[in-house]
Image (cartoon, rainbow, N blue to C red):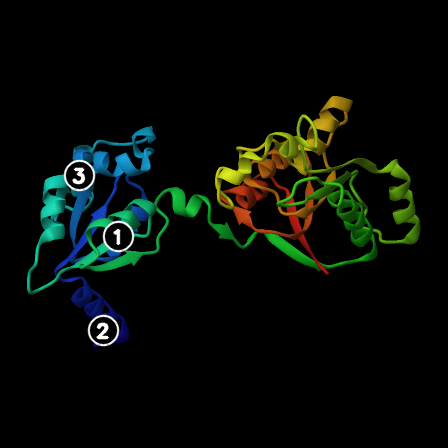
């Protein structure tokens, strides 16, 4: 028996008597690959009653506009995998399974998503559960996950980028935000020269279009007058609920107000943009984004790459 056959045999042995639980609003290749990975597992699709139970806790599954009914999902999946045992899992059946005390304990395979983590902690604590780390949909766990910025290239800090980041860092110091201070500068496309003449010409404002920092509105002192609504949330949660305007948004709105095109310009920002600001940068015409710190969330780096924005991390 060769190595591949050994691996297949070992996998099938591990999945015998296992149960794969799925929330299946749509069918795509991610689900197909998951089922192919566990060829011997019995498949349970959450039905309306179990989805409703989960949504009492999460209150967002009902908003899934793509969603097939569980029965439609079952029929479609059965067409793809006619030999597999596929059932709908109701609240009653799930509670019965979770309370069973049997000698031979089956393995429950769950996608590593918010709803299944909750189900395991609340109902399956005494069961043998394996979480499968696969991307099937956006959920509360991966929507707030911090990621390495895959699309960036890294450069050593040259004289020109150092000066531009100095401008951004000086702006950063003006921010009244107690949690995070970000500075940014947008310039006309740079030829790549780091000569003293190029730097001096840029710093004479011939090429600098705008500089900005994140600040509160309508006044920088708003959090000290009315308190800061961000205090109600954990880090990275509800980042859109804020009285602040981000540095990138301030730059782009200033350019719009002044009637200045940002086509083929470059932005230097001290911290990698949030998802909303990444989209603003992508749609503004900016061609290069330089940053030193931070991480990507949601789809920010992918959107920039899709719109042709070159992302460059400056290594100090």
Q: Secondary structure at mark 2?
A: helix
Cα distance between the residues tagged 3 and 2: 32 Å
Relative vertical location of residue 13 with respect to residue 23 in this rendering, above or below: below
Percent x, y of residue 273? 61, 43
Q: Rate crowding at label 2 as few (under 14), some (14 to 19) or many (20 or more) other CA atoms within 10 Å.
A: few
From the viewer's perspective, is 204 left or right of 213? right
**Which circle marks residue 6 in the picture?**
2
* Mark 1–mark 3 CB contact (< 8 Å): no
Residue furthest out toward the bottom: 1
Relative vertical location of residue 189 with respect to residue 291 in this rendering, above or below: above
In front of the other: 264 or 123: 123
Q: Rate crowding at label 1 as few (under 14), some (14 to 19) or many (20 or more) other CA atoms within 10 Å.
A: few
Count of picture labels: 3
From the viewer's perspective, is 217 left or right of 36? right
From the viewer's perspective, is 228 left or right of 172? left
Res 115 → quadrant: top left
> In the rendered view of the protein, which quadrant contains the N terminus?
bottom left
Q: Secondary structure at mark 3?
A: helix
Q: Secondary structure at mark 1?
A: helix
Nearer-N-terminus badge (1/2): 2
Percent x, y of residue 11? 22, 66
Res 46 → quadrant: top left
Q: Residue at x 78, y 23 (%)?
A: 258
Question: Viewer-nearest of labels 3 and 2?
Answer: 3
Percent x, y of residue 128? 20, 61
* Mark 1–mark 2 CB contact (< 8 Å): no
Relative vertical location of residue 192 with respect to residue 138 in this rendering, above or below: below
Q: Residue at x 31, y 34 (%)?
A: 61
Residue furthest out toward the front: 225
Percent x, y of residue 193? 84, 51
| Residue named by callout 3 | 74
From the viewer's perspective, is 23 left or right of 286? left
């Amino acid at each position: 028996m060769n190595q591949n056959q050994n691996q297949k045999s070992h996998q099938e042995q591990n999945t015998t008597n296992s149960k794969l639980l799925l929330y299946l609003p749509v069918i795509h290749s991610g689900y197909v690959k998951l089922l192919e990975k566990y060829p011997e597992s019995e498949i349970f699709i959450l039905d309306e009653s179990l989805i409703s139970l989960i949504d009492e806790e999460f209150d967002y599954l009902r908003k899934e506009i793509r969603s097939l009914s569980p029965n439609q999902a079952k029929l479609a999946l059965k067409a793809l995998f006619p030999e597999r045992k596929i059932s709908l899992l109701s609240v009653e059946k799930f509670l019965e399974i979770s309370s069973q005390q049997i000698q031979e304990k089956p393995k429950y395979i769950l996608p590593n998503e918010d709803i299944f983590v909750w189900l395991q902690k609340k109902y399956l604590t005494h069961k043998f559960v394996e979480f499968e780390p696969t991307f099937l949909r956006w959920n509360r766990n991966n929507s707030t996950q911090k990621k390495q910025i895959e699309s960036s290239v890294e450069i050593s800090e040259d004289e020109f980028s150092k000066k531009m980041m100095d401008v951004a860092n000086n702006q950063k110091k003006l921010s009244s935000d107690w949690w995070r201070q970000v500075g940014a500068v947008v310039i006309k496309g740079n030829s790549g020269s780091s000569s003293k003449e190029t730097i001096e010409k840029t710093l004479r404002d011939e090429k600098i279009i705008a500089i900005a920092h994140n600040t509160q509105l309508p006044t920088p002192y708003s959090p000290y007058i009315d308190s800061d609504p961000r205090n109600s949330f954990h880090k990275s949660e509800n980042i859109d609920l804020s009285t602040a305007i981000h540095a990138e948004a301030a730059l782009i709105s200033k350019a719009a107000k002044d009637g200045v095109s940002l086509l083929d310009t470059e932005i230097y920002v001290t911290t990698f943009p949030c998802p909303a600001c990444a989209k603003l940068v992508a749609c503004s015409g900016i061609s290069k984004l330089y940053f030193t710190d931070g991480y990507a969330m949601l789809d920010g780096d992918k959107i920039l790459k899709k719109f042709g924005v070159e992302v460059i991390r400056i290594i100090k």
